[in-house]
Amino acid sequence: MHGILAFIKRLTSMSFQALHHRFIDWTKPDTATSLLVGTLTDLARSKTELVAENALLRQQLIILSRHVKRPVFKKSDRMLLVLLARAVRTWKQALFIIQPETLLRWHRQGFQLYWKYKSRTASAKPKISAEIVALIKDMAKDNRLWGAERIRGELLKLGLRVCKRTIQKYMRQVHPARPRGQNWKTFLHTHAEQIWACDFLPVTDLLFRSLYAFFIIELHSRRVIHVGVTRSPTDAWTAQRQIWGGLRSDCADESHRDSHNSLFRPARECHL
C-alpha cells in the first residue's frame, strides 16, 4: 500500500512539473510567434509539410548535440537541410542555428555543382601519342595546301582516327596565323563617305499612340538623308523608304535636280 501511494505521489509531482514547464513555454515571449499561435497555425497546414518541418528541426538538433560552439555542417547536413527546406513553406521561421541567407548560399552552391557535373564531358577522350602529333605536324609542314579534313583522311588510311579539331590545333602550331588586316574602325574611317546608317525610332504622339520613325543618315557628315513615319512598319514599306532615300540623295546634286531626268527614270521604274 505504501508503495502504491509513493508511486501515485511521484506521478502527480511529475505531472505538475510537466504542466508547469508547458505553461512557462506557452507564456514565454517569442520574437517570431508564440507557441499557441504557432500550434493554431499548424492545424491548417498539411501533414506532409509538418513532417518535413519536423525533420528539418530534428536535423538541426542533431547538429547542436555535437556540443560545438560553432556547429560544423557536413556536406550531407547542408544537402539535407536544403532539401527539407524546399518542402516547408515557412522554412525561414523554422531555421534557428543558421541564417536564411546561409541556406540560400548552400542552395546556389549545390546548383553550381550540379551544372558543373552536368556540363562535364561525357567521356574523356584519350590523348593522342607524340608520334601522331609529330606526323600531323609533318603533313601540315610538307603539304601547305592540305587542310584538316585532308590530313584526317590520310590518317584514316593509316588506321589512325583523330578529331578534326585536334588536327587544327596542331596545324596552328606549324602555320602561324596571318597578320590581321585593317580593323573595323579603320574601315569605317576610310569608307565613311560611302556608308549610310538607318534605324527605327519608336515615338509616342499626343494621343499616346505608337509611331515608328525610320531615318537614314550619312555616316561621314551626319546629314539626315531621309525620314519616314508609320504606325506599322513592314518590309515593303522599309524597302520603299530606302529607295526614296537614295533617289532624294541623288537628286540633291545640282546636276540631278530634275526628277524627270532620263538617267533616273529607268532606275526609278525598276525600283517602283
Image: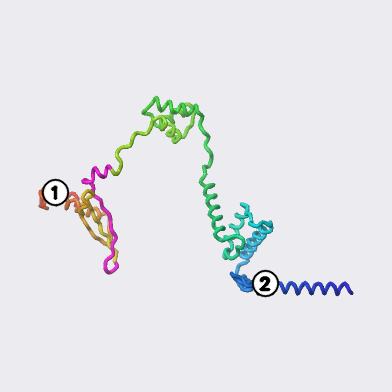
Residue 25's disc number? 2
Please determine whether, in this image, residue 123 is positioned above or below residue 63: above
Residue 207's disc number? none
Residue 92 appears anywhere in the view? yes
Q: How busy is the neighbourhood of tag 1: few (under 14 within 10 Å), some, or many (20 plus)?
A: some
Label 2 or label 1, whichever lies nearer to me, is 2
Label 1 SS = loop
Please determine whether, in this image, residue 126 is positioned above or below residue 93: above
Occupied quadrant, residue 183: top left
Three-letter code for the amino acid on which mark 2 is drawn? Asp
Residue that label 1 marks: 264
**Residue 196: percent from left, percent from top:** 23, 49
Label 2 SS = helix
Magenta segment boundaries in residue numbering: 186-208
Specify the farthest residue to the right. Answer: 1
**Residue 30: percent from left, percent from top:** 61, 71
Number of dots carrying numbers: 2
N-terminal of the pair, mark 2 or mark 1, is 2
CA gap, disc 2 to disc 1? 96 Å
Three-letter code for the amino acid on which mark 1 is drawn? Phe
Left or right of 235 in this view: 47: right
**Residue 75: percent from left, percent from top:** 61, 52
Answer whether residue 199 is magenta in the image: yes
Answer whether residue 159 is magenta in the image: no
Q: Residue at x 25, y 59 (%)?
A: 213
Quadrant where the N terminus is found in the figure: bottom right
